[in-house]
Amino acid sequence: MIKKVPMPAQKIPGDLPGELIDQFGRKVDYIRLSITDRCDFRCVYCMAEDMTFLPRDEVLSLEECARLVKIFVSLGVTKVRITGGEPLVRKNALWLFNEIGHLENLNELVLTTNGSQLEKQAQDLKNAGVKRINISVDSLDSQRFKSITRTGDLDKVLKGIQAAKRVGFENIKLNSVLMRGINDDEALPLLEFAIKHAIDISFIEEMPLGEVNHTRESTFVSNADTLKLLQSKYTLTPSTHNSGGPARYWQVAGTQTRIGFISPHSHNFCESCNRVRITCKGELFLCLGQEDKVDLMPLLRQHPDDDMPVIRAILNSMSIKPKGHDFDLRRAEPAVIRFMSHTGG
Ligand code: SAM
Ligand code: SF4
């Protein structure tokens, strides 16, 4: 039994709320923290081919990341997802996982990764206290995988998935973005792969974030259509499973696999939003699909020994958390200029 690390005593003054409740009464208890904008892949729906990444001193240090996580946990956050860019290409990322993995009151430390580094790191991540891993795989055909990711090696990712299973991660989930004319014929093969390996899978509708080489409308695949297709081959029953996120789940009868659908277009999930996102620059974004944000990096750097200015800024940000995104596929320009790899998916 691993001992939980008590939180440092940070007394929140009585005049401030001790938890994060937004202007619509939604409780925020989940943060997604991007620890790098860099990645070893260049997925066509996520990044441009030619990306300029941030200089190192404009990115939160790992110590600043750990400090932020501790502050959020002291404000009632119980789930933290580490993401990116590709979080596992950040040098010494493991230090951060070890630093926060066993914090008292943090129920779930989870990770989203492209899987390329998992074969090497799965065991250390498990030891550090990571509870669940989401691994992005959009194709099981190595040529096509290469063309979607531009640089990725499917074999490495498959070995990463095997390693995660081997070291005992129980809740592994694949994330797949289907694009019309590119990989929309892989919904069934991807599900079959998930069933064979007794893992879950989520289908994510492509979101209009950042300027890429295609219009999002041209590649859009509705999750409603994907569901219909999968139902033609499998018996799916609605599942009460709730991962604390926007996905709606279905159980595949006679298997251990659940299918999640993250459908920002066909099923808006904003009314139950419980999360905020922090970019690797320390920007606290209140909504994935809107520009409302608070810059935490200057406060962290100006007050290295006093968390109160950061705590106040986070509490105040609850008054500007928007009601929801307004993604519209018919708009020519992206809804939000920043890439998903900047905000952290
Ligand atoms: N590099 C890691 C990975 O690929 O899992 C973590 C970061 S990535 C930005 C997180 C998730 O966002 C991935 O599952 C990816 O497929 C998804 N994603 C990226 N851009 C997207 C977009 N425009 N629409 C929908 N999902 C997107
Ligand atoms: Fe990298 Fe993940 Fe974006 Fe693909 S989806 S380019 S793996 S950050």
Image: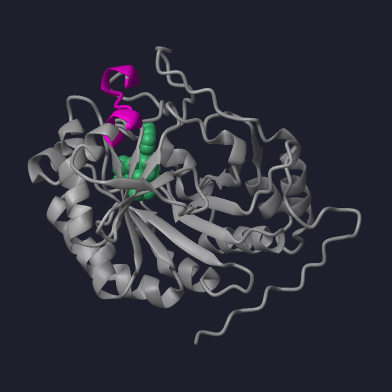
Would residue 217 appear left or right of 275 to someone viewing this image? left
- Say whether residue 223 is visible: yes
State the residue at coordinates (35%, 68%): 170
Residue 124 position by quadrant: bottom left
State the colouring used for the structure image.
Answer: one colour
Q: Nearer the viewer, residue 140 or 252?
A: 252
State the residue at coordinates (38%, 70%): 125
Q: Horizontal and vertical percent for residue 184? A: 20, 32
State the residue at coordinates (14%, 41%): 146
Would residue 139 appear left or right of 294 to someone viewing this image? left
**Relative to 242, residue 53 above or below:** above
Q: Nearer the viewer, residue 139 or 333?
A: 139
The stretch in magenta equals 216-227
**Relative to 49, residue 18 above or below:** below
Q: Nearer the viewer, residue 200 or 80?
A: 200
Q: Report the label total.
A: 0
Looking at the figure, which quarter contains the C terminus? top left
Q: Horizontal and vertical percent for residue 50? A: 29, 32
Would residue 136 appear left or right of 125 to someone viewing this image? left
**Relative to 79, residue 152 above or below:** above
